[in-house]
Amino acid sequence: MSENQKIYVVGHKNPDTDSICSAISYAELKRRIDGDAYIAKRAGNVNEETQFVLDYFGVEAPAFLAEVAEAEKVILVDHNETSQAVDGLEKAEIMEVIDHHKIGNIETPVPIYFRNQPVGCTATIVYQMYKENAQEVTKEIAGLLCSAIISDTLMFRSPTCTPVDKETAMKLSEIAGISDIEAYAMEMFKAGSNLADKTPEEIFFQDFKKFEVNGVTFGVGQISSMATEELFEIADRLKPYMTTAREEQGVDMIFFMLTSILDESTNLIFTGEKAGELVEKAYQVSCQEGDYYKLEGVVSRKKQLIPSFMGVLQ
Ligand code: MN
Ligand code: MN
């Protein structure tokens, strides 16, 4: 291995604010403690919410990494599942994983630093690592990490949110000079659900993940909003696209979660032969107006929807 070989720090495809901000912040930490080989990358387009955050703190988006080449080195943040990772990962050398999701299917030929904590956001873990390494968290880094926590925990409303996430976000908001965190969160989510000039396809893939359980493949997209009426408009735009999305993704079922942050509920639209049956078994609910399910209290794909679906499919 050459001395100056780059090491890419990269989050999942269809990156969210956590995947972008944790990659930037962790690459910065690694550069400070371990030299300048570390470069943050992104595995997809920056969404509107994340762009708002980057602009707010005057930080540039990482460069796009379309594919990793043979023997390139990567650190994965905010995922540990090959189906969500940058293309070419099987040829790459995975150096580390920093994540807060269920353990997926990443395999390595040698031991690596694998850090997974059941907290609400990768950014919470990255903050801990700054502290463990006695590194100063700058105003910009604090702003990025704080925003990632607000985003992943839906401003502390998600059941994935732990007291540590909340405490960390409050500390970071002070460093970042965010005087009113609720108001800042509102602005951030509003930027994220500004979809007027977007195609259904762009909305659909803004936050989309694929899963496989016992040979059944399915994809789940999600959008969260503070404005419930807006979610119905988005649903109307997405419904005609669902079948195309399923065919293009080559999966058995597709679901899209339209999550109301204030109501703490999700309207779930779906396509695929057994999709409705799966939802009904998982939640004992019946279909509304023939084409969606209302899931009260469900806001988290990771902690609520996926485990319920897996329970049925296993
Ligand atoms: Mn994420
Ligand atoms: Mn995350």
Image: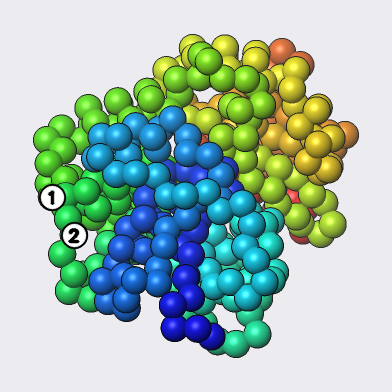
Mark 2 residue element: loop
- Residue sitting nearer the eye, 182 or 306: 182
Disc number placed over residue 262 in the picture, else none: none
Is 298 above or below relative to 140?
above
- Residue sitting nearer the eye, 125 or 310: 125
Separation (CA) of disc 2 from disc 1? 8 Å
- Residue sitting nearer the eye, 32 or 219: 32
Q: Is residue 59 left or right of residue 258?
A: left
- Residue sitting nearer the eye, 39 or 172: 39
The answer to whether any part of residue 267 appears in the image is: yes
Question: Residue 298 at x, y = what percent?
Answer: 52, 37
Residue furthest to the right? 273
Q: Which residue is mark 2?
A: 137
Question: Residue 2 at x, y = what percent?
Answer: 50, 83
Q: Which residue is mark 1?
A: 175
Write the residue at 68% across / 62% down.
88
Write the residue at 16% across / 45% down.
176
Question: Residue 280 at x, y = what percent?
Answer: 74, 35
Question: Residue 234 at x, y = what percent?
Answer: 58, 17
Write the residue at 36% across / 55% down.
24
* Dot 1 alpha-carbon crowd within 10 angstroms: few under 14, some 14 to 19, many 20 or more: some
The answer to whether any part of residue 170 appears in the image is: no
- Colouring used for the render: rainbow
Write the residue at 61% across / 28% down.
202
Q: Earlier in the sequence, mark 2 or mark 1?
A: 2
2 and 1 marks in contact (CB < 8 Å): yes
Residue type indicated by callout 1: Ile
Residue type indicated by callout 2: Val
Is 5 above or below relative to 84?
below
Query: Which quadrant holds the C terminus?
Result: bottom right
